[in-house]
Each structure stands twice: as structure tokens, then as C-alpha cells.
Image: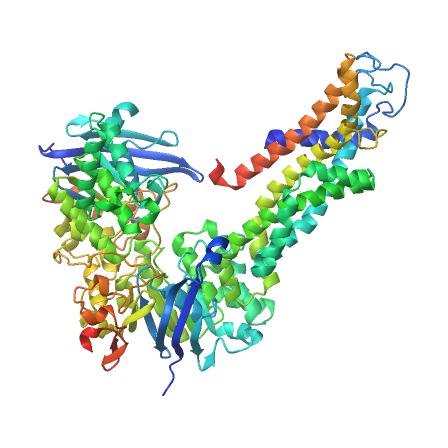
Amino acid sequence: MKLGFVEVKNLKKYFPVQKSFIAQLLSKSAEYVKAVDGVDLTLERGDIYGLVGESGSGKTTIGRLTVALAQPTEGLVLVDGVGLFSIKKDQLRKFRKRVQLIYQDPMSSLNPKMTVGDAVTEPLRYLDRAPRDEMKQTVDAMLEKVGLSPPETFYDRYPQELSGGQRQRVVIARALVVKPDYVVADEPVAMVDVSVRAQIMDMLLQMQKELNLTVLLITHDLAVAKYMCNRISVMYLGKIAETGSNEQIFSNALHPYTKALMAAVPVPNPRARTEKKVPAGEIPSALNPPAGCRFHPRCPYVLDRCRVDVPELIEREPGHYAACHLYD
Amino acid sequence: MLAGLVMVVFIVAMSVLAPFLGTQDPTFLGSQVDSPPSPRHPLGTDIGARDMLARVVWGGRFLLIVAALAVILCMAVGIPLGLLSAYRGGMVDRVVTLILDSIYAFPSLVFALIIVIVFGSSVFIYALAIAVVYVPSYFRVVRSQTLTVKELPYVDAAKSAGAGRLAIIRKYIWPNIIPSVVTVATINFADAILITAGLDFIGVGNLTRPDWGVDLYYGREAILSGAWWVIAFSGLMILVTTLGFSLISEGYAERTNPKLR
Amino acid sequence: MASKTLTTGSILQMEALYVEYTSDRGIAKAVQGVSLELKKGETLGIVGESGSGKSTLGFAVMGLLRSPPARWSGKISFEGREISSLREGEMRKIRGSRIAMIFQDPMTSLNPVKKIGSHFVEYIRTHEPSVNEKEAIKRTEATMRDLGISPSRINDYPHQFSGGMRQRVMIGLALALKPHLIIADEPTTALDVIVEAQILQLLKDLKEKYSLSLILITHNMGIVAQMADRVAVMYSGKIAEVAPTLKIFEEPKHPYTQALLQSIPTVEAGRRVLKVIPGSPPDLTNPPKGCPFHPRCPYVFAMCYDEEPKLLSTGEEAMAACHLLNRKR
């Protein structure tokens, strides 16, 4: 079977729940938050792959796992054939040049005591031993590319002196300065002003083309996913509910959760005001997820089987997968 | 904060410049015992007929040196310990924290007392005693700040950029926790002075030294015979010094942490 | 300014509202000459980004602006009565019982050591001392049912509720004293998409059930499209455009409104090309001279740099502040 550029196989991440000393003595079993519970993903080179989900879906955790900023409980992540968790530590360090992460909060993802220039130079310093003047040139070119022009005016500034949109550009510059192959963009525009989002999104699309990046775009915003991604997986409570191409997901969503998400998004079109039937309840805790299909307590189409059997992610039409008993 | 700075600068200047200020010899045993303020002895004399003005001017030196030394020792041990332990985490962190919390629980004055009694009352021993007791304070503050900063995305980003453990601590964590260290250091200073003066007051210290705490020791008895000047001025000096440092500490904390305003 | 007839049936009027407050970086001109009217039973959406002044408007109406650090001038009338010059004691009688506010973050607005039921009961009894405890509890249970929360949870604590539930509690508290006007400031921004839809539906239902008037403050155009009868678009402390919802979306007259609508992605069918708006929202401590949008406007011309455009009528109940409108005449 041909491997994608980024392959995620049966990825699991369980976080043990901190218990007090006495509780630990009294109870036998450890409790886990099953943030990611058996996820498979295949990203082809050049994909902009959207990972869509609400809070508690595990999407941010997956992002961090695929750039080796966290260790999985189980499962593999392969980037260009290399298993991120099976190589030695120093090999991993060198590999970091190829995988980077763009964070969602531009304020807390930049060191307040470091200038823009220093921040963007850091990855070059550690991952790309080039002489100092060469590094400065590379950084200047990068700042220019992300729209922080002229670079000299931004080089010595501190993050606090910049606007939200400018900070986000610095974060992107820092991630892309080493010309990685694979980038995880975690909610890249969620904390940016509305009128500035299009700038950032277009800039990301441009950079993706230029560097032939493979991007995992993590977002809760379906509209952003629709605009930017060619392929999308929808997650719910640590598992994938549906995977398909942009076209498939938005014109022919299969999973009831995907449909619910689409129906729930407030559309900027006053003529599209329908009485929305939204599922009741909220996302349950990942500590004790519902048995069987995790969505069953809220699903308008629930069958008896759903309460007991965990649905498998099965291909329903070429390239379009859904984990739902309605289609079994 | 400014008020505090003024006070501290005044005290430090006075202590440093003492040899040049042309006072009488603070250790000279004269003849007018316990005499009230007069033109010849503007602040009176004590039981050894030593000039009080001279003793006030000279009395801070020992205390300041001990405090400075204690702070330096404390920082040298407490800060790296806090940084490394918090960053490392896990079992190591828990053990180290346990040890240091135990020391923290110890009453500082008693501990210092024991050490000074056993090992003598030189500058170094005093400083060491105070340092040992105070290291946990630095440790705790540095550790808690490090734990917080460690979880921030920009530390993750540093890891992504390939930075090693030491580089991260040096460039990403330390610069962001300096304000809290300064706050602890200034309080540490004030406390060190109080502990040292306190030990002198009990009579444990070297009683021949010109030292505000020693003045308090003599002043205890002197006041019974109505000689208030022995205790008053030296006591005032201690007050001003510790108040000064406390004000700096608070003022600085307010400046750097907008939430406190 | 376009002529304004004081329409009967108007429940809230803001006239020439100016708000400034001192911040770390200077004096922020949060609201600069805003006049708005809200009709009884209407949902008015106030849309703006950070630095538009939209939240400040809400606080001004509630009399929650503290001076210092805020300084303000202008007139606010509620139900025919001027409330802008009321003293705190008088304002307190109105707050909660006539006008209530819902905030973005339900977590910090609830007391963690008080049971949910207590929040309601104490609130009711403080404002209506004649109500006894039993009566208050009955009312609370009825409210909880309205909110979609099981009354059996009356003795639970805030931390036992999820984000969406807590926001429902906030809405319930806002309604507890049966106010006539609700101001909701980004009520769903901190919530997940599906819960957001639930809460918006809840607001719609409750508004109808209790004949409320609603001011909905948000940065999300989708929300106002779904909820509002009229929309006021704010930019840099001023109103850029105000019109009935349909008109704002289908015939926007202000370049900012137009650009905003063309720059937001949507899940609706079809492939879109988003129009990029250059620049960033203005800094309130240093707003641009002339028209605040001019640095980013695709149609900017000479007049825009120096003169502030005034709100001009663009149709039935619609106004926009743009020099282009003058030109067309």
C-alpha cells in the first residue's frame, strides 16, 4: 500500500488523571482522558488537510503529536517514511527542520523577551548551521514574504509592539523559515481580527504553493476549512467521524455529526434563516465517553446498535469515509 | 518604590562612606557612660560610653554585608535549583521539592540561632545560616514561575526550533521570570537584616562590633535606666532599612505585574 | 446628520455618545459620536472588530462605565426617560430589572462557591424583597425549565456545569427580573459551534416568549444575519453603516461593510475568492484623521484623508458614513 507523505496510524493519546494520594490508594484503576483514541490519517504531499472539530475533539493534540511535541500512548506517525517516534533523539532534532507548527495564539507563542528578528532566527540557528550574515538575509527575505515589509523596521521590534495580525505573521515566518516539508497550522486565524483573516489565509495559501508544503490545518471553523482545504477529516471526542474531499464533505456530508456542524454554523446570509434542528446536549467529557458510537446520545438518527457497537471508519464512496452504522 | 529606593540608597551610602564621615570611633570606650544627647555626643552614649552617632553611622555595615552575602549565596543555589528541578519535572522534581519544603518549614530564626551558636558569629557564618533558610523561598518562586512558563506555547516553539534544554532555560524561561526573583531578593535582603539584628539583640553576636542589633542588646537595659537614645536611633535605622527594601519590593512587583494595581 | 424623528415605539435612544478612557498607551477614543435607536421588540445587531467600540456602547447603556478611567458625554434615554445622568443608586434599580446584560465569559461571572439556585434566589429577593424564599425557588425552577436546564440541578455548583450550560444560567439570570431590554455582548464567542446554535435559538425563543428587545454585540456577521432585524456596523468608534439586515447584506453601501462581507469565508455552496482587506483595524489611541477607514479603503480619494464623513441616509431606515455617497448626488 502506498504511503502518504504523512501517515498517522492508530494514534492514541491518553492523559492520566491526577489523583490525590488517598484516592490513588483507594482506587485500583487509573483514569484516563482519551484525548485521541485510534486515529488514522493519510496526507499526500501538497495536501492542505483540514482537521475539523470542536473542543475536546483531540485535534490540537494530534497536531502536536505529528510534530513530535508530544509522545503518543500508542500508534505511529510517519513523515516521508520516517517514524517520528522510532528514531533516536538526536536524529529527531535534525528532523525537526522538516516539521513545524504554527500556533493559534500569537501572543503566547512568541517569547516576549525576544525580538522579531531573534525569534525568526532561532530555528535557523539550531537546525540549519549557516553563517550569521546568511541567516540574517534568510530572515529578512522571510519577513518580506509574510508581509512584514520592510524587514528592517520589524527586525528589532518586540511582539508586544505589533498588532495581532503582524504577530501571527511572525509566527508563520518562524515556522517556515527553515523551509519545512510538513506544517501543522493550529487555528491560524482564530485569534486574528476578522478583517485581517483573509490576508493571513491567502498568505498561507501562497506560501504553501511556493514551498510545496503539506499542511495539516486544524480548525473549528468549517468555513475556513472549506476555503483552504482540499481534504478534510471531522473529529468527535477523539475519533474520526468522517473523512473526504472538500467537495464530498460539503456537498454530501454523511455523518450525522458533520451534518449537525454544518447546520449549526451561522451563515452570513439573512435569506438562509431556517429553524435549525441542532442536536441537544453538549460534548461529553473525554474521561468517560459514551459507549458504542460516541455521538449516539445526541444523534437524531440513533439506532439500537449505535449504543453498543463502535462504528468503523469505512469507505462509502471512493475517498469518502464515514464511521456510522447508518451506512453499514 | 521610589521612597523605598531613597531610603535604601541613603542607608547604603551612609554605611559605605562611614570611614569618611569623620565621626568618632564607635568602639572607643569613653568616660561618659549612658549620657543623654549633648553637643559632644549628639545622640548620646551607651553603656561603654561609646558615641551613639558614630555607632548609628557605622552600625549598618555588618548587617548590609551579611545580607548581601546571604542573598548572593541564596540566589546562586536557589535559582538554578528551581529552574532545573521544575524543567526536569517528574520524580526528581518531587523529591527536591519535598526536601526544600521541609527546610522551608523550619523557623528561620531558630535555625540561624543554632548555626551561629555552634559555628561562631563571623560574617560568613551569619550569611550562610540565613542563606540556608532562605534558599527554599527562591526555589519555590522560581519553580512555580518556571512551571508556568514551561507550558506556554513559545517554549514549545523553541523545542520545534531545535533548541536544547539549556538554551530554552537560558533564553526563554529565565528572562521571563526575573521580575519575580527580584521581588524575592528584596524581601530576602530585608529579612536577612532583621534576622541578623535579631540574633545580636538576643546577645548571640559579637558584642564589640558596631552594629545596630548590638545596640538594641545594650539598649534593653539602658532603657530601664531612662537612656532611651541607645535603643531608639539604632532601632530607627533598622526600621528604615527594612521598610526601604519592603517598599522597593512592593513597588517593583506592582510595576511589573499590572494585575496588582 | 440625517433627520431623526423620535419614533414612538422606540425603547432606547443614544444621542451623540462619546466615550474616552485612559489606558496604558494613551487616551483611547472608544466611541466617537454615536447615535442609535432601538425599537421595541427589535433585535439590533452591532457588528465590529476589536477596537470598534461596540462593547463600550453596551457598557455605556448599562451605566457600567467607571470614571475614571472612562470619560463620556451624550444622552441615553430608555423608555422615554433619560438614564445617562442618573446616579448609581438610581441606575441600580434599572440594571437587572429593566435592562440586563449578558457577557462573553460565563465562567468569571458566576460565583464558584454559590449554588446555581442560590444565584437566582438571592438575585430575585434582593431586587424584589416582597418575594419569599419558596416563591423565589418556584420562579427559579420555572426559569431553569425555560433555559433547558433540569430543575433538579438547582443545588449544583457552577463548576459542575459545562460552558454552554453556564451561559444558559447567565441568560436566565439576565431574565430573572423580567427586564425589557437585553444587551448580549459576544454571548457565544467562547462556545462551540453546536452549543452556539443552541444558545442563539434559546435567545430567539426567549425574546419572543417575553417580548424582549435585544441588542446583540458581536464580530460575527453570520450571527447578525441569522438573528438581527437591523444591523449597525461600527468601525473605530463610529457607526459606518446602519440598515435593515437584508439591506446590509445585499446592498451594503459602506466600503468597510462591503469589504468585510467579501472577505469572510462561508460554508455555503460555491467556490469563493476572498477579497483581502489590507492593513489592520485602527488603534483607538491614535485613530486615522478624516475617515477612519481611509487607510484601507479601495475607493479612497482626497476628501477622505481630511474630513470625517457624516451619516447620510441611503434609504428606508438606512444610513452610511461615506464621502462616496455625497459624490453620487
Is residue C282 depicted above or below C271 in this figure?
above
Query: Where residue A261 appears, x then y in whole percent?
Result: 23, 62
Is residue B127 depicted above or below C275 in this figure?
above
Q: Which one is in front, A252 or C36? A: A252
- The quarter of the picture where residue C237 lies is top left
Q: Which one is in front, A275 or C160? A: C160
Left or right: residue A82 versus residue B107 is left
Point out the image quarter for the N terminus of chain C.
top left
- The quarter of the picture where residue C69 lies is top left
Left or right: residue B186 versus residue C287 is right
Which residue is depicted at the point 58% across and 46% down?
B141
Q: Which one is in front, A225 or C244? A: A225
Which residue is depicted at the point 77% across and 41% down?
B115
Residue C233 visible in the picture: no
Query: Where residue C208 appears, x then y in whole percent?
Result: 11, 44
Query: Which residue is the extreme one toward the bottom?
Result: A1
> What colouring style does the render use?
rainbow
Residue B51 visible in the picture: yes
Is residue C291 depicted above or below C195 in this figure?
above
Is residue A228 depicted above or below C102 in this figure?
below
Which residue is depicted at the point 61% across and 54% down?
B83
Label total for image: 0
Query: Where residue C39 appears, x then y in whole percent?
Result: 13, 38
Which residue is depicted at the point 57% across and 67% down?
A125
Left or right: residue B17 versus residue A92 is right
Query: Where residue A303 appears, x then y in whole percent?
Result: 18, 69
Q: Which one is in front, C323 or A9? A: A9
Left or right: residue A223 versus residue B91 is left
